[in-house]
Image (cartoon, rainbow, N blue to C red):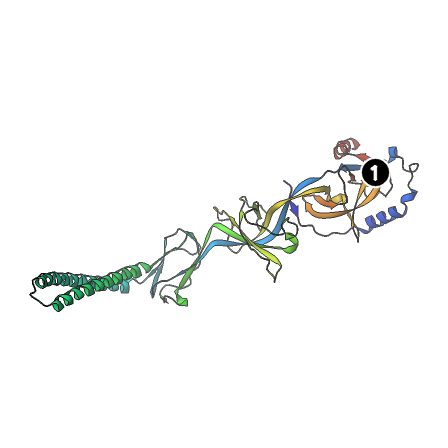
Amino acid sequence: MAFIYARPAFYLTGLLAGALLAGCEQGGANTPASNPVATGIPARVLLVAPQRVPIVLEAVGQVQGSKEVEVRARVSGILLKRLYNEGDFVREGAPLFQIDPVPYEIALSQANAQMAQERARQEQTRREAARLKTLADEKAISQKEFDDAMSAQKLSDATLQAAQANLRQAELNLSYTRVTAPVSGVAGRIARSEGSLVTAGQDSSLLTTMNQVDPVWIRFSLSESDLAKLPDRRLDRIKSAEVRLSLPDGSRYPLAGRLNFAATQIDPRLATQELRATFANPRVQLLPGQFVRVQLAAGERGNVFLVPQTAVIQTEKTFLVFTLDKENKAESRPVQVGDWVGNDWMILGGLNPGDRVILDNLLKVRPGSAVSPQSPAEAKAAAPAAK
């Protein structure tokens, strides 16, 4: 599949420009007698036909972990030990740090003791309420005494529930003294060294960061000039085709990605649309912060012609190609060019189906010159024979 790339500007050499202008001035001097078809300038000729060409937009992107998490201490205490190697890949739930657990073990023991005390008090109030209920039914005590016993029972039940909550909180705090990985990914460098006091809810609670690197996200933007090449002048993540990457060394990343985010508006400061693609990264070839080249397939452009770049002449005012008329005489044809497609140039206007475009010997060709046309295949076959 051919891909469209952004077209760099280049300019015709002085020799070629001079030759073209001279040809325009002397076009009428070339007659069949001076340039008969039989002895015309030999040149390869391409018969053009309209084609559909994929539109591929390029941009610079930056790798980002699909999850970037700050690992923080959830309880205060002395940081006793680091349990991982910085930069290692760790699984979700793996231990990273150990905070001094002794104060929280003591708090848990106190919560257990309070829980036992409140459970015993609850049993006592229930027995008392049951005994007084019998006496109240026999009118042996006042109603007030029975109501007080029932209130004491309900108060004991509520106090027991509070003790249960305190016990659960103490157990949770103790579990937080062992800091574990919240996601699977690459653990960063340690932010607090062993022996430091960390305080929950403050800046000192930050211990390290983690990046989930499989999958990764690639963030990039497209300019309004790129978006103008698209049918809807914007990208839709649902309708978009695959995304490809080129690594910093120029090699192609083997896996394709997909858009997972497309901004619904153009950034007024930069005149760009922000985009994001997701890529599987099983071998961790892509690292957060890395810059890559993004190639985004964004549909197709129809009814265009592909002409080799060497056949297109650029002057100060326009682009030209030489074509052949019915008498095999050259004529210059202004054309509207688009982007490069591999080694070809996309021609958007100025050519018609069936036109014959001259591909070589352009320095000898003048408007009105007789040309002995050869197809690219014939020229290739004749080249060894000439040797």
Between 145 and 176, the one nearer to me in the picture:
145
Is any atom of residue 182 visible in this view?
Answer: yes
Residue 105 visible (yes or no) = no
The answer to whether 292 appears left or right of 196 in the picture is right
Q: Residue at x 37, y 53 (%)?
A: 94
Q: Residue 262: percent from the left, percent from the top?
A: 55, 53
Q: Is residue 26 above or below residue 373?
A: below
* In this picture, residue 159 sits left or right of residue 75: left
196 with respect to 41 (left or right): left
Q: How many marks?
A: 1
Q: Quadrant of residue 146?
A: bottom left
Instruction: Rate crowding at label 1 as few (under 14), some (14 to 19) or many (20 or more) other CA atoms within 10 Å.
Output: some
Rendering quarter of residue 143: bottom left
Q: Position of residue 257 (x, y in %)?
A: 53, 46
- Quadrant of the rendering where the C terminus is positioned: top right
When the figure is inspected, residue 13 is found, relative to residue 369, above or below; the finding is below
Name the residue beneath numbered marker 1.
325
Comparing 71 with 137, the one in front is: 137
Residue 336 placement (x, y as % from top left): 75, 48
Question: Which of the image's four quarters has the N terminus?
Answer: top right
Which amino acid type is shown beneath numbered disc 1?
Asp
- What residue do we see at 27% from left, 65% from top? 103
Classify mark 1: helix, strand or loop.
loop
Q: Position of residue 121 (x, y in %)?
A: 16, 63
